[in-house]
Image (cartoon, rainbow, N blue to C red):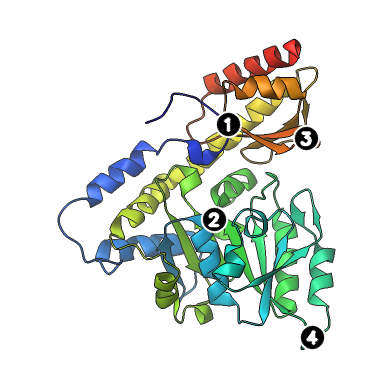
Amino acid sequence: MSDGRRGFASDNAATVHPAVLESIAKANVGHAFGYGHDSYTASVEQRVADALGAPAGAQVYFVFNGTGANVLSLRAALRPWQAAIVSENAHLHTDEVGAPEAVAGSKLLVAETVDGKLTLRGLQRLIEKPNDEHFVKAGLLSLTQSTEFGTLYSLAEFRSLVDTAHAGGLLVHVDGARLANAAAALGVGLAEVVAGVDLVSFGATKNGALGCEAVVVLNPALTEGMLHLRKQTLQLASKMRFLAAQFDALLTDELWRLNAGHANAMASRLADAVGAIEGVVVSRRPAVNAVFATLPAAARVRLLEDFDFYEWDATTGEVRWMCAWDTTEADVDGFAAAVRTAVASA
């Protein structure tokens, strides 16, 4: 049960959207063949593929969580002597307890990163390293859109990185835990925000789902063995229709965009409110649903007594406040008032 706190720690802390619960309930009728071998799951897989602009031969694989989606993507794309290029803030690098190395057996190469975004220069430097038998060879570029810093690659920036990676012989993966937030912020569809890439970890959990992600293999050449890899990576659901039902709800009438757009708007509202408080510095204008700010240590301690959020950088006093699909204007205004009180008392 919830303890009633309305925090800003993560969009994972949010409730499940009623439409998702309703969709699961609708799927909970009669028997269906397990492991995704049922007509309903197949129809939702096609809906996801269509939404992401998948070509003929592309495939969709529902999985339990983001780490599983990312690791499965690496396993599908990389040979044992190859590595993935990531930003220094990438979830693959910082928050998956070595799963890419331990489970996928894939080394990560960290590229130059500015404000959460991997730079073209950093990518080129790693691509241009000598092809020496003593060194791991880059085989994949993994981009996080939106980034862990709540920043966005513009469509032009994204395309430049994708084209450079492909020209260098690399495949491209997108860690899209908050892909919906990125598409909503950029004002484009899901297909546009992943145009040209080979694999996508398409997140639903942070966008109002109960717990489901999808690995979308847009490059048909990478689909061989994926059914086996999903099982081997411990990501095969026996009652797959209930994972499919969550995506079914989010794709209906673009609920994903409504949820993501609302979360983004609440973050913008929060940034405006706290940015007007003396003693609070908003690190950057929020592009999606994350607000990063610095405030006095005493104020942080006081706020953490009543609200959940992450202290992002203890050395600078930077915190991260996340908004979600169910964050209300009252939540934002009440929290901003609490920030003002805490800073004043500090």
Q: Inspect the image, locate mark 2, and give the three-letter code of the amino acid beneath it.
A: Leu
Which residue has dot 3 on it? 283
Mark 3 or mark 4, earlier in chain: 4
Q: Quadrant of the C terminus?
A: top right
Mark 1 or mark 4, earlier in chain: 1
The percent position of residue 195, horizontal first and vertical second, equals 61, 64
Are the residues at dot 1 and dot 2 in contact (C-beta closer than 8 Å)?
no
Which residue has dot 1 on it? 8
Residue 25: name its quadrant: top left
Q: Badge 4, how many Cα within 10 Å: few under 14, some, many 20+?
A: few
On screen, residue 309 versus residue 41, left or right, reads right
Q: In whole angstroms, how far apart are the C-alphas of marks 3 and 4?
A: 40 Å
Q: In whole angstroms, how far apart are the C-alphas of marks 1 and 4?
A: 46 Å
Q: Inspect the image, locate mark 4, and give the three-letter code of the amino acid beneath it.
A: Asn
Secondary element type, mark 2: helix
Secondary element type, mark 4: loop
Q: Which residue corresponds to the image point at 59% horizontal and 57% vertical from the top-left? A: 96
Q: Is residue 181 above or below residue 275?
A: below
Which residue has dot 4 on it? 131
Q: Nearer the viewer, mark 1 or mark 2?
A: 1
Which residue has dot 2 on it? 190
